[in-house]
Amino acid sequence: EFARRLYDLIVAGGALNGVPAPEALTKAFGPKCTLNIAGFSDNKSSTIEAVLLKNGNIREIWGYVYCLIKNDKALTDIFMKADASFFEGVLGAEAGARAFAVVQERKVEVVTSATMPSNLKYTFGIPDFLWPTKNSWVNFGFDASLPNDVGGGVLWVRARTPLVNCTETGLMTDSPEIYPPLSLRELKGQCQGKDLPCRLQWWPGANCYKMVADSFYAERATRNGYRMVAGPSGTTANVFQLALSLGFTDDDLLAFRVVMTAWLVQSNDHSLLETMLAAESQMPSKYSMQWGRKSYDLDRWPDFQRIWPRGTTLHTSWGPVIQSFRFLP
């Protein structure tokens, strides 16, 4: 459902700006991606359409979503221009109304932030439509200081620093660690005519960043015994904001938190803690993470179980009901 709505938004947004559907898809999903991104195979409009509407696996779909969220101009060109009737035409009356309200509120923040000095808007503003909320843990991934006119003191140091060069995962295309197995599209893109299996070109988050040991995030994670990979997940926060901009509800975010965790932890882009924390500022409190709790006989891995809180049945806004389930022994 997320993939379908996103496809429809980009195609309709292209029409709004006088751009044919194939060109709109390529311009939205192609410019910021390479074969170093898991799930990305090429930027052909026919491939993007097949992945989003027909038979893309979880890695392919969210790989293209990742490509889009790194290309903020594509969404800005749509959101700055679209009115209520546009969203209702693309998403339906209810979802469209929700999406328009979210985008309009964010639009005010983006326009306001554009007038702020460049050294302040990323700490105290909302510079684009998918930027994490001001109370998001993702903000600890960046250095932050007070404005110079109030002393310019350091608020916190960044949780991570980028490595000079990312390195590839080291896995081969037939590795049993990869689930689901690579699609034919992915194999073609990764191997580029070489014999199968070939070495993957993917750059996982763990191979692109170094954690800063004395950062606020690292101190808290270490104190509570959590694994760190690449800091609180900006991708998760971006996807949540995009989901709300596509007319999904706050409760729907529970399903997307499961997806983000399944995608990003398995690929070693982030840890469980980093996807859960990144989701916190937008999750309804009833689904909130409870970090620091210890396991005992009747409640094993309580933090892990918050991915899908025990006894929760989710009635999604688009129809399906996801029943409560037990996924731990």
Image (cartoon, helix red, strand yellow):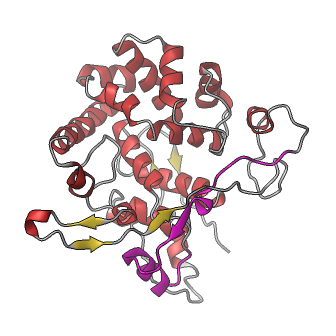
Residue 207 within the segment the image draws in magenta: yes
Name the outermost residue toward the bottom.
Answer: 296
Q: Nearer the viewer, residue 20 or 55?
A: 20
- Please indicate whether residue 30 sits to the left or right of residue 59 in the image: left
Q: Position of residue 295 (x, y in %)?
A: 55, 86
Q: Is residue 266 visible?
A: yes
Q: Residue at x 50, y 71 (%)?
A: 211
Image quarter of residue 146: bottom left
Residue at 32% over, 31% down: 76
Query: Above or below — where is 18 with respect to 52?
Result: above
Query: What x and y, as percent, mark residue 38?
Result: 65, 45
- Residue at the left extreme of this rendering: 149
Q: Which residue sits at x=15%, y=42%?
A: 115
Residue 309 in view (yes/no): no
Task: Check residue 221 for magenta coloring.
Answer: yes
- Where 143 sits versus 192, above or below? below
Q: Position of residue 172 (x, y in %)?
A: 82, 51
Magenta-highlighted residues: 198-227
Q: Which residue: 63% across, 30% down?
A: 51
105 is higher (above) or lower (below) than 309: above
